């Protein structure tokens, strides 16, 4: 079962049945995200992976060419020829990227396959998943323990999908008392970008408008006005 597998991963990180039962829901969110980041890699089609590698090589060659010219290792004419060749590579690679972004080559079969399989199977057997996979596993793992961990009892978790951005991440709601007033605390996290070494926090410009207008409108339409948007950060992270 997914629940037992997730609990086993928490135990392997030093938690006991008692400490897991008493874990704060924000700490649970962070640790579960760390577990998924360790367990899975983001799935990239081979063609897109090659395009990303070429991008890195182009950036490296650009920096090396600039350094060689600045230190006098190559002439202005040689630097110009290198720049011309680098620009040709950049333009060709950009056309490849547009093709893969447009067709999502390699992703369709993976989406269909994952959608048909149980989360427990994916958790136990897979090594590479896309953003929908990260979010689905996170939500199901969270919900599998919601009745066993008191701090999760007043929370709910779901996916947040932005079709324009063609991406999905996690929304976690909890009811809290702030200055004597009941407030809906909302966290947005992105386990996919966290696996890539970026911030877990999804309350940023790459996920939402800067003024959060789209979020406020959605909550307002649902009749919810008292919303506190925060993200849990461990004290030792310093931010």
Image: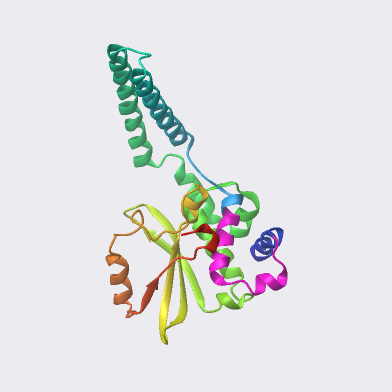
117 left or right, relative to 105: right
Residue 186 lies in the magenta stretch: no
Residue positioned 44% across, 59% down in the render: 201
| The quadrant where residue 58 appears | top left
Q: Is residue 41 above or below residue 59?
A: below
Residue positioned 68% across, 71% down in the render: 19
Q: Quadrant of the N terminus?
A: bottom right
176 left or right, relative to 99: right
The span picked out in magenta is 14-36
Residue positioned 42% across, 68% down in the render: 230
| The quadrant where residue 18 appears | bottom right
Q: Nearer the viewer, residue 130 or 152?
A: 152
- Number of numbered discs on residues: 0
Q: Is residue 159 above or below residue 219?
A: above
Residue furthest toward the front?
A: 71
User: Which of the colour schemes (rainbow, by chain, secondary structure, one colour) is used?
Assistant: rainbow
102 left or right, relative to 178: left
Residue 17 lies in the magenta stretch: yes
Residue positioned 41% across, 77% down in the render: 184
Per the picture, the main secondary structure of the magenta-coloured stretch is helix
Position of residue 71 measured from the top left corner of the image (x, y, whole percent): 37, 18
Residue furthest toward the bottom?
A: 180
Position of residue 136 measured from the top left corner of the image (x, y, whole percent): 51, 60
Position of residue 12 measured from the top left corner of the image (x, y, whole percent): 71, 58
Position of residue 170 measured from the top left corner of the image (x, y, whole percent): 46, 62
């Amino acid at each position: 079962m997914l629940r037992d597998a997730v609990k086993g991963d928490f135990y392997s990180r030093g938690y006991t049945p008692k400490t897991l039962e008493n874990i704060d829901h924000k700490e649970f969110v962070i640790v579960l995200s760390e577990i998924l980041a360790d367990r899975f890699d983001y799935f990239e089609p081979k063609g897109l992976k090659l395009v990303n590698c070429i991008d890195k090589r182009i950036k490296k060659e650009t920096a090396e060419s600039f350094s060689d010219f600045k230190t006098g290792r190559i002439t202005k004419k040689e630097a110009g020829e290198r720049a011309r060749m680098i620009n040709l590579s950049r333009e060709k690679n950009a056309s490849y990227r547009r093709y893969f972004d447009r067709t999502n080559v390699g992703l369709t079969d993976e989406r269909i396959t994952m959608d048909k399989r149980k989360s427990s199977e994916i958790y136990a057997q897979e090594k590479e998943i896309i953003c929908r996979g990260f979010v689905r596993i996170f939500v199901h793992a969270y919900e599998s323990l919601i009745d066993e961990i008191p701090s999760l009892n007043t929370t709910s978790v779901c996916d947040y999908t932005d079709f324009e951005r063609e991406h999905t991440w996690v929304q976690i709601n909890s009811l809290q008392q702030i200055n004597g007033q009941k407030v809906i605390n909302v966290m947005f996290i992105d386990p996919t970008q966290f696996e890539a070494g970026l911030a877990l926090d999804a309350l940023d410009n790459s996920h939402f408008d800067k003024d959060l207008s789209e979020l406020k409108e959605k909550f307002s339409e649902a009749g919810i006005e008292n919303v506190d948007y925060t993200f849990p950060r461990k004290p030792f992270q310093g931010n």
